[in-house]
Image (tube, helix red, strand yellow):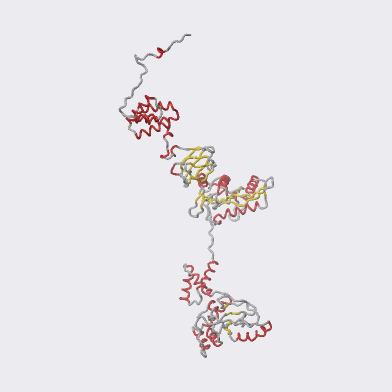
Amino acid sequence: MGYDRDTVRKYFRLEEAKPATPTPGSGREVEAERAPEASSLEAKTATLTPGSAGSSEAQAVVASRGIKSVLAVEVCTPRNEKPIAAGREGQITREVDAGPVSSANPVVARGEAMTIAAVDVGPPRHPEPATPTPGASAAADANTTGEGGDGAEQFRQALAAARASVSLCVNWKQEIEAGLDLGLSAKRIHQDLVRDRGFAGSYQSVKRFVRKLEQAAPVPFRRMDFAPGEQMQVDFGTGAWIVETRGKRRRSYVFRAVLSCSRKGYSEATFNQKTETFLRCLENAYRHCGGVPVTTTPDNLKAAVLHPDWYDPELNPKLASFAAHYGTVILPTKPKIARHKGRVERGIDFVKRALKGRSFASLAAANLFLAEWEKNVADTRIHGTTRRHVDQHFLAVEKPALQLLPANIFPSFTEGKRRVHLDGHVEFDKAYYSVPPEYTDRDVWVRGESRLIRIYTLKMEPITVHARAEPGQFRSEAAHIHPLKRRLADRGTVYLLERCQDIGPCAGAWALVMCQHRGIEGVRVLQGLIALGRKTPAEQLERAASKALQRAGWRLGDLKQALAEPANVVQIDFLEAHPLIRDMNAYQIPFPL
């Protein structure tokens, strides 16, 4: 039989009993009554040494004193030291002092012994322990040492472990580590130890021991090595103060790029970390190194990554276009894992030490200092890891491996997400540009260049291109008008006259003369004539147009009036010339002068 620390702490806990009622009185009366109170409490106290009989003797002492419950158990160390273990609710009790024993201080034994301080506190919650018979202590001793002859020895080991705060799992460390190597849980390891090894400790002991083993054996980091021209790491850090002419101080940022193989670097001071600033710094770093690496590794700053994701990050569309222009691949680090770009992290510290305690009158002065420092200090050092001259290593090994630079720099443009208005236009730089009707009330991506406006879907699929307009102007394409919203007037007067001519020759002639008489107003009359032709047979409309033409009626109402007339009405045309009609000059009367 074995004892772990929890067993020792709870070994003699039976039941709670009524607390002793303190005697009222003055201070002297308390001192006078302290001695009999201590003696009465001593009568209800027993000491268990490591080699004693165990619980049987404790139960005999408790029963002989008429105590219904044991309140606390303490394993005490020498005087004026903290106890090793305690039995009140399984927690360590207060430090043992040299004060007198009373109901408030139930500890009565000093030295290396286990003390049972019992107080009768009331009726028991559990069945009372059986009253031992004479000789029970000796029988208990025999039973304790009879299980293989090592019962007392195991108790002494558990007691010693409790005193020294040593886990019982120490002797089974190899078996526990072997179980962890097999991927077993702490629960399974405890079950195997109890079944196969006779382990006396609790599951909590094994779990605590396993936790310590896991903390003591961290997984080592893997060092990442890169081929020449394979990777460039970039990052921003805090720069020096810029003190302007009026004394105003502005905090700057320092951009740092480091080639992972040779540690060749580039530094530039900026006032912000916007997307355009980030791209220009990155472009300057490529041109400073004379080539483009295969991959570029930034962190997840907002200027580069819209939605961080280790497996499939969503890059800023402008950065994606920049990478396509230069032929590099953007591979951001894992979110919140700065060690994935450890070379540039150390590079940021390196340049910050150079800027520490310095201030500059302008951003240009700061960049001039960084260029000189890069040339005279950073490039001329012997790197602590590679043990090689940085600039010579770059020129000999890494620069020949870089990709060629494109002929042109990346074009400067502004872009952003916009929502298509209900009229089928998007607003960009205070001007308006049309899109096809299926994108109404949806988000699109608009890119504004110096002369063109390019509109894409959010997946960067092209939609349309417009010439840049002045603020307040509209750029609309006829193909972007919904079929139900296309007007006949948008197609022009010629188209409308052709449609009227299709009705018949009289309708076409009337339409042409009407437009000559009424001008712009006649455009709507032409639309009315075409609409009338969809409702009226062509023959009737031709007769009505002929009558309106003879009557010189150039309004749509004249045409409708002619349609309403019966078909048997004969149209009489007045003659302008006839033999019976005299000339108008014959009716002139001469007046004398």
Q: Going by the image, does 558 lie left or right of 142?
A: left
Eyeballing the image, is 99 above or below 562?
Answer: below
Q: Nearer the viewer, residue 458 or 236?
A: 458
Q: Quadrant of residue 57?
A: bottom right
Query: From this viewpoint, which residue is outermost toward the front?
Result: 592
The residue that appears at 36% across and 20% down in the rendered structure is 574
Q: Going by the image, does 242 lie left or right of 521?
A: right
Q: Quadrant of residue 104?
A: bottom right
Q: Nearer the viewer, residue 48 or 453?
A: 453
Eyeballing the image, is 236 above or below 65?
Answer: above
Eyeballing the image, is 249 above or below 581?
Answer: below
Q: Nearer the viewer, residue 476 or 201?
A: 476
Residue 245 image point, x, y percent: 69, 45
Eyeballing the image, is 278 above or below 468?
Answer: below
Q: Going by the image, does 499 lie left or right of 278?
A: left
Query: From this viewpoint, which residue is outermost toward the top?
Result: 593
Query: From this viewpoint, which residue is outermost toward the bottom?
Result: 134
> How many marks overall?
0
Residue 380 image point, x, y percent: 63, 50
Residue 142 image point, x, y percent: 51, 87
Q: Going by the image, does 539 lie left or right of 94?
A: left
Residue 320 image point, x, y percent: 50, 47
